[in-house]
Amino acid sequence: MARDPLACYADLRRDYGDVVRIPFTPRRTFYLLGRPEHAEHVLVAHQDRYAKAFTYRALKTFIGDGLLTSEGDTWRRHRRLVQPVFSRRHVQAFAPTMVASATARAATWARRESIDIATEMRTLTMDVVGRVLFGTDLASGAERIGGSVTRLQESALVATLFPTRARSLVPGLAAASDTLDDLVGTVVERRIANPHDTPSDLLDLLLASTGDGPPLTAREVRDEVSTLVLAGHETTASTLAWTFALLSRFPAARERLHAEVDEVLAGRDPRAGDVDRLGWTNAVISEAMRLYPPAWTIERDAVEADVITGVDIPAGSTVVVSPYLLHRDPEFWPNPEGFDPARFLPGHTGDRPRCSYLPFGGGRRICVGASFAQLEAALILATVASRYRLDLAPGARVRARAGVTLHPRGAIPMTVTARAG
Ligand code: HEM
């Protein structure tokens, strides 16, 4: 399991069936749930019987009580205040910032023959999240924040197993956690002292957001901002890195993408309003997230005893829904290992069960940044595809690492060819 969790999940599912009971420690049992109706049961229909799993607790010690890690009334109040900030109107207003970041990054490739697309996408999505959250206030801190977030994620396993000792067990972890908290804290405090006249970034919107109760305190805003930095950059970066690697392996899909962006954009940069007309571009991203869902495992703890399709789930056990397994189940996905974006074109989605595709989770804990991520990924893909053809460098090996997120292991070298015109 520790060496290759993806293969382990797939083997367990194949060898033992729909629900697999995995003894984890003497006091904790895992249940790997293999079917869409199980996902629907846990995440949607009976979500009150489940809470975020103990595996999230470590994260809490680093980023505090933000949306990703909080529960109960705290979570409900925060979600009510944060969700409106991610409304379609606000998210679309960030499109020019997303495109400006993408064109600036892509311009640096013009003089290079080869790039590591995994690093490039991480740098780019960190830049986007930094600018969208904080405007220009963070210019010099973005790189340090990116480094801290990577460090926190790398140590997640140790932190999950030994939450109280993780800071002393992993060298550099305490420093990384403090850097993130200090940088975010400074920006938040400075903004509270000197508010903008009209909201220009997500931080302004968060500070101004009011539901039917009191607004978020400075400490709460700080935790939410750290959460958004953590949740909002590597997931999108991985999606894009996988997308470019897959397109290089499937040139017909890439040609169709190039034809679509040429036709819709006619040589200009993309805008938010173009995205609905970029049907193939969106389908390519959805298919990449099917094969490589960044959130490859979603875990919950049963707060009360439950029965799932006839299987007893004792209170206190941990249930695992794996988008990775569901997305590759041949019952719902013909040719499951193939890259076929057409399955996501409007009118082609067939009658797949609701929870057979869960890149953003489901139920009330569904990703609050889903439309932000989809818009960002489409705009970045269209910006790059209109300028360059990217090919995996000869001999490049694309391997997955299933940590907190499913991300590329190491570099993905790609050669850059400017597209004519
Ligand atoms: C392709 C990119 C992304 C993917 C695949 C993704 C996936 C997910 C998933 C599966 C969850 C639910 C986890 C669970 O139920 O345990 C989640 C939650 C969350 N995501 Fe995303 N995410 C992405 C991008 C973003 C972005 C861009 C942001 C913010 C800027 C964001 C912010 C959050 C937050 C705050 C939560 C917690 C929501 C809550 O519990 O109320 N995500 N994400």
Image: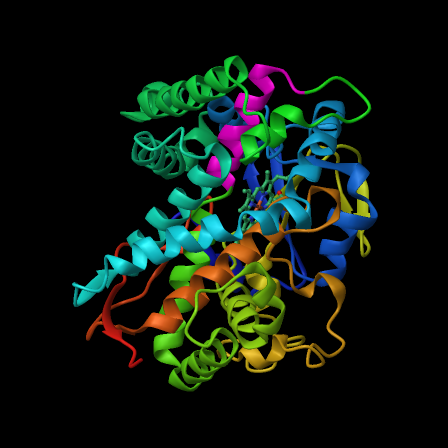
Q: Is residue 235 left or right of residue 322?
A: left
Q: Position of residue 122 (x, y in %)?
A: 36, 49
Q: Is residue 9 above or below residue 31?
A: below
Q: Is residue 387 left or right of residue 238?
A: left
Q: Is residue 167 above or below residue 94?
A: above
Residue drawn 48% across the image and 64% down it: 270
Q: Position of residue 258 (x, y in %)?
A: 42, 79
Query: Over which residues does the magenta segment extend?
Result: 216-231
Q: Is residue 164 above or below residue 27?
A: above
Given residues 47 and 9, the one toward you in this image is: 47
Q: Quadrant of residue 172?
A: top left
Q: Position of residue 410 (x, y in %)?
A: 27, 54
Asked whether the viewer can see residue 129, the reply is: yes
Q: Quadrant of residue 76?
A: top right
Residue 223 is one of the magenta-drawn residues: yes
Asked whether the viewer can see residue 401, the reply is: no
